[in-house]
Image (tube, grey):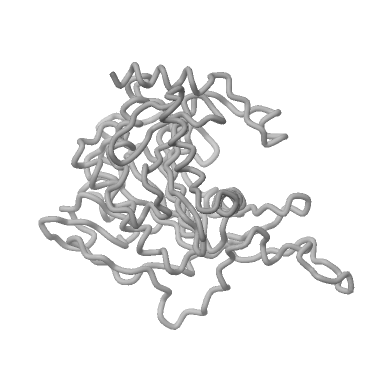
Amino acid sequence: MSSPEIRLDQLTGLRTILAPGRADRPEAFAKAARDLTPAGLEGCPFCEGAEEKTPPESWAFRPSGGETDGPGWVARSMPNLYPVLGSTPTTIESESAGSDPEGSYPKGSEAPAPLETGLAASIDPLRASTRATEPNLFASSPADGAHEVLVNAPEHVVSLSELSEERFGTAVSFWRERMRAFADESAYLHLIVNEGIEAGASREHTHAQLYALRFVPAEIARERERMKAYYERTMGGDLLLDVITEEIRRRERVVAVDDEAVLLCPFASRSPFEMRIVPRAASPSFELDGEMGTAMIRRAIEGLAKLFGPPPFNLWVRTAPKGADRFHWHVDIVPRLTVLAGFELGTGVPINVYPPERAAADLRDALG
């Protein structure tokens, strides 16, 4: 086995992506200490001037111009050297200086399998409509898609919290730019930021990753269906908009509010200091919403940094999957302050030892 592959758990019907190439990463199974020595900084492939150490760029923003795969950029993306997904969807010829290449398939390549937007995978043996055929309990399919690295800044900065307001805004705009590039050919776009070894980061230089999936993960599909059901039951209500309206009224878990978005600790937070940024207007797609919510994302990360200095954390964007009738995007941030144990892993039910009401109060105090 060499290429990424999707396999289905026979008991749950849930997908697992097997990506054997990821095991070739340096320290793939070890927690290596961050190297902050001058030699370590010089060896960082994400710093400006080290462009030859990465795969050829797929996109870069060079406000003053410059050559492709050269210095002068303020945000830059390239295919992941150890991709989770196969390379069927890719980007066309690299461009720079703020250009906007679109995602596409290589000319002459074989067309990929159709996008899967339903709850069940096409290879699920329980989807068979008749018992006449022996079910294939070990079916698999290629894990097609795209996996990009998005470098947030040319300087060797190890946390989003260290970026200036301008640099932070450029980084978030960059995330949206790359998500739009893959929107047409993907069933779901999942953008993440991992900060710190405990959060799964293999490079300390601040960066994001974008997964252009050709299926809708079960958790996102479930959220989509609940939003649609709520809309129908309430004759036009928006589930997340109604949640934040009530949260603002109660003020127990709200951390901050501005004209664009609400920052809160979710009612059923799965871990201490979990935060959610929600736009105050019903909006399905993060990538199509201009600069909406950028200031509040920065404020959330600032609050964590003030409390914990900053901690390792995971951030992800939850945007509308393809074909969603009703959705409301949000950004979730989960600091890695505790460790999952046997109960959580075995049942799928989180245990949170720090109530969100207490976490929200701490964050409000930290942010002043």
Q: Quadrant of the C terminus?
A: top left
Which residue: 45% across, 49% down?
A: 328
Where is residue 48? Give x, y as percent: 21, 47
Which residue is outermost to the left? 64
Residue 51 in picture, x, y percent from top left: 26, 54
Say which quarter of the image contains residue 120.
bottom right
Locate residue 149, reporting x and y percent: 37, 52
Residue situated in front as seen by the camera: 223 or 48: 223
Decide if residue 41 is in sight here.
Answer: yes
Q: Which residue reaches farthest right?
A: 132
Q: Is residue 20 above or below residue 91?
A: above
Q: Is residue 42 left or right of residue 273?
A: left
Please say whether residue 32 is visible from this viewpoint: no
Name the residue: 76% across, 65% down: 127
* Closer to us: 11 or 90: 11
Q: Is the residue 197 above or below the residue 21 in the image?
A: above
Residue 209 or 279: which is nearer the viewer? 279
